[in-house]
Structures are given as C-alpha cells and as structure tokens.
Amino acid sequence: MENSSIRYIFFVMFSIFFTIVSISSAASSHGEVEDEHEFNYKKNDEKGPERWGKLKSEWEMCGKGDIQSPIDLMNERVNTVSHLGRLNRDYRPSNATLKNRGHDIMLKFEDGAGSIKMNGFQYELQQLHWHSPSEHTINGRRFALELHMVHEGKKGRMAVVTVLYKIGRADTFIRSLEKELEAITNMEEAEKNVGMIDPKQIKIGSRKYYRYIGSLTTPPCTQNVTWSVVRKVRTVTRKQVRLLRVAVHDGANSNARPVQPINKRVVHLYRPMV
Ligand SMILES: *[C@@H]1O[C@H](CO)[C@@H](O)[C@H](O)[C@H]1NC(C)=O
Ligand SMILES: *[C@@H]1O[C@H](CO)[C@@H](O)[C@H](O)[C@H]1NC(C)=O
C-alpha cells in the first residue's frame, strides 16, 4: 500500500473514533437527562402540560378529569364559611431526605412527621415540595413560589396544604435548608439525607384558607384531593426561589402547571368566627 493511502485510512479511523467520543459525551451531558423526563412544563411541547393525559394510559385524568388542579382562586367566586374549622396541624420532627425528582425538589419525611385533621379524617404528612412560579393564582395573579405539603389518609385519601410566596424577605424554613440545597445542586446523586426536620417550623401566619376539591398537579393527576390554600401570601427572596429551581438541573425555568377549569366546583374561604 502506498504511504498516502495508509495515512488516509488512519485519518478516517481517527475521525470516526473522535466523532463517537464526542457524540457519547454530548449524550451523557444533555441528551440522556432530557430523555429521562417523562413530562415537562413547556407550552406546546410533545411532553408539555396540554399532552400529559395522552402520554400514558395511567395519566388520562390529566386530560379528561373535570376536577383538576391548580385553579384560579377568584375572590368574587369564593364562598366564605366558618364551619370548616382551623387547620389543625399536629406535626413533629422527622428524619428527612431531600430528593431531586427531575421536575422538582422534594423533602421526604422518612418516619412519622405528624398529621393534620380535616373533614373528620386524619392525614399523615408524607412530603413537601415547591413549584415556581406558583400554580394557584388569586384573582389571576401568579406568585413567585408555592409550597405543597402532601398528606395521606386511610384508603388513599389525599390532602395538600399550600402556602404561596411573593418576593420579599427570606423564608426561614427554606433558609434552614439552604446549605443542603446547595450541596445537592453540586452533587451527582439525586438525594441527600438532611437529618431531623421539624415541619412546625413552616410558618403559615393566617387562619384563613381556601378549600376546594381538586387533583394532584403532576401526572397521574389523581382526583379527589382536598386542597387548603393558605390565604396569607408569605415572602421568599429571589435567591431562594432560584436555589430551589437550579437544584433540579432540568434546564427549565418553571415547574408550574397552567390553571385548570373550575367547572362546577365551589371554592370555600374559611374564616374563623369572631
Ligand atoms: C436518618 O436516616 C439516615 C438514613 O436512613 C440515617 O443514616 C441517619 O442516621 C438517620 N438520622 C437520624 C437523626 O435518625
Ligand atoms: C373523595 O374523598 C372523600 C373525603 O376525602 C371521601 O369521603 C370520598 O369517598 C372520596 N371519593 C372518591 C370517589 O374517592
């Protein structure tokens, strides 16, 4: 073989090798992560909120359910009542783990973190997580952040207690987790044990809350979830909102499902009798 053709063969082999190396490294830094996401929050995307119900048969409620969440809590539509009773939170410290679920950051309570009583039922606190911007809106206004405290009762009954936040002073509960959030942002692993966390440290600051029956706001969008959205909007810093979002590593800047039709539902606003 001539010298020049040997050189040519080497050149071709080298180019092929180099192409394979660069394709596989690109796949592990972007492609794979993207493909792992089963759903996303992009408008008009094949995996976006308008199509969640079509992605899997178990997710059909996301598309055809008629009591879906979140909703807009419009003041002129709410029915003010005093019979629902205060949110009776009976929480206690529990060993907890921060988990990156690919679309949000969840704080999972590993052993009993206590419970809340409503409608005569007891619901155990399982986990909490954040959405930004908020999913529920009040009179069409969206806020910077929304906390979901997810509770489960007997027979799979679900109850979510929600706090909305606008930009302002720091939230002390998130502040207590900032170091751990920074740590999972910089880590390859998706979870980190954070020791004993006391859910009583989550400030609510109001007895008033909106109550309605809706669904989970992520697939499978299971219905018949009792929602209690605290009336008072609390505050969080821009940096805290960013910290919660960046830790997810999903390259998205939002994880809020658009508001869903109210249909025939009634929204109550609980106000204690004076
Ligand atoms: C919490 O759980 C983790 C792992 O399950 C364990 O290693 C740790 O010791 C526990 N911490 C406390 C305070 O119980
Ligand atoms: C919906 O939830 C309420 C109370 O949480 C329960 O009494 C009722 O049986 C549930 N309905 C369905 C269809 O699951």
Image: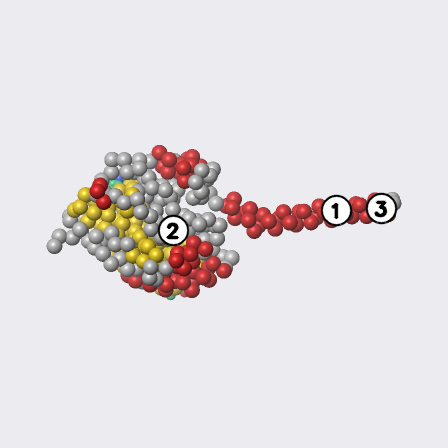
Foreground: 193 or 147?
147
Q: Which residue is mark 2?
A: 132
Q: Are marks 2 and 1 in contact (CB under 8 Å)?
A: no
**Tag 3: amino acid:** Ser
Q: Whole-percent x and y of residue 210?
A: 24, 48
Q: Indicate the secondary structure of the residue bearing disc 2.
A: loop
Which of pointers 1 and 3 indicates the residue nearer the eye? 3
Q: Earlier in the sequence, mark 2 or mark 1?
A: 1
Q: Which residue is mark 1?
A: 13
Which of pointers 2 and 1 indicates the residue nearer the eye? 2
Check the image and report above or below for 212 versus 177.
Answer: above
Between the residue at mark 2 and the residue at mark 1, the CA separation in whole angstroms equals: 49 Å
Q: Are marks 3 and 2 in contact (CB under 8 Å)?
A: no
Q: Which residue is mark 3?
A: 4
Q: Indicate the secondary structure of the residue bearing disc 1.
A: helix
Q: Whole-percent x and y of residue 23?
A: 63, 47
Going by the image, does 253 lie left or right of 201? right
Going by the image, does 189 lie left or right of 231? right
